[in-house]
Image (cartoon, grey):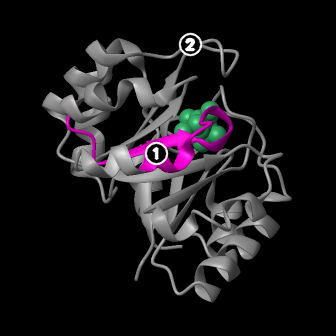
């Protein structure tokens, strides 16, 4: 299976979101990655449901929603309501992670579990087979344009080994500091989906960058 690319809208020009979403529609991107922040779990606030609803109206790509918020279980209905394909919750925000994952799936969405850079992959031993995707944060969540944390590559290898050992179909997504160089490294380590914000939206030709990331 060839890998997927999920551009992160966080680095787009918010003064012209429509153009950014239409660019992604026309590109080789597979999903559109949407970062929701609450200013509590992470030290930043991004955008919420009214914006997501607007994005959904324009986007032709499946929406990959990354919730950097406390108590994400409270918002499953809203995320379903905007038509998300994948709902990613942080391991660190879910006391009853298994229940959260079950409810996401019962609501017809794919369930992703996200790990902060300091959270070990080994904590997923008893849930990895029950989730559709694990999202490895390769920066501390909250901001675009940060530097890739090198140790993330090792975490991806360990996770890949766990998934293969359990004969699971769980996908691995990587988010933070991904460019042509780090993207290649994480794909070699076992990643299936690359999220990229700054690398795509800060170049003069974002569509071409998506195409380049796609052919890594
Ligand atoms: C960070 C977000 C990322 C961010 C990635 O908290 O989860 O999705 O947009 O941006 P880059 O690719 O610039 O690191
Ligand atoms: Zn993200």
Residue 140, quarter of picture:
top right
Q: Is residue 158 left or right of residue 114?
A: right
Tell me the residue that label 2 is attached to: 45
Task: Tell me if mark 2 has few (under 14), some (14-19) or many (20+) residues whose alpha carbon lies within 10 angstroms of its own.
Answer: some
Q: Can residue 117 be seen at all in this image of the molecule?
A: yes
Give the extent of the magenta segment: 82-101
Q: Which of 98 and 158 is in front in this view?
A: 98
Q: Name the residue under label 1.
A: 99
Whole-number angstrom distance, CA of label 2 to CA of label 1: 26 Å
Residue 39 x, y percent position in the rendering: 62, 12
Q: Which one is earlier in the sequence, the residue at label 2 or at label 1?
A: 2
Is 74 within the magenta? no
SS type, badge 2: loop
Number of marks present in the image shown: 2
- Whether the magenta-drawn stretch holds residue 98 is answered as yes
Q: Which residue is drawn at 63% across and 66% down?
A: 126
User: Position of 134 compared to 43: left or right?
Assistant: left
Residue beneath the point at 31% across and 60% down: 28
Quadrant for the N terminus in the image: bottom left
Position of residue 62 measured from the top left corner of the image (x, y, whole percent) = 26, 49
Relative to 132, is 163 above or below? below
Q: Which residue is drawn at 50% across and 80% down?
A: 168
Q: Residue 35 carries which label?
A: none
Task: Give the SS element for disc 1.
Answer: helix
């Amino acid at each position: 299976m060839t890998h997927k690319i999920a551009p992160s809208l966080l680095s787009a020009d918010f003064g012209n979101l429509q153009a950014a979403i239409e660019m992604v529609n026309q590109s080789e991107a597979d999903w559109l990655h949407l970062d929701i922040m609450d200013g509590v779990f992470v030290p930043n606030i991004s955008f919420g449901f009214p914006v997501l609803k607007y994005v959904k109206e324009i986007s032709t790509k499946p929406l990959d929603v990354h919730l950097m918020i406390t108590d994400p279980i409270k918002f499953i209905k809203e995320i379903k309501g905007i038509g998300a394909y994948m709902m990613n919750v942080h391991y660190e925000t879910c006391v009853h992670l298994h229940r959260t994952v079950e409810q996401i799936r019962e609501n017809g969405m794919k369930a992703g579990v996200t790990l902060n850079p300091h959270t070990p992959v080994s904590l997923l031993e008893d849930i990895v087979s029950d989730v559709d995707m694990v999202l490895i944060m390769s920066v501390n969540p909250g901001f675009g344009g940060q530097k890739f944390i090198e140790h993330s590559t090792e975490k991806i290898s360990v996770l890949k080994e766990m998934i293969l050992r359990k004969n699971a179909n769980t996908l691995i997504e990587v988010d933070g500091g991904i460019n042509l160089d780090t993207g290649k490294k994480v794909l070699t380590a076992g990643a299936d989906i690359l999220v990229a914000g700054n690398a795509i939206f800060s170049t003069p030709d974002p569509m071409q960058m998506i195409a380049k990331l796609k052919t890594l």
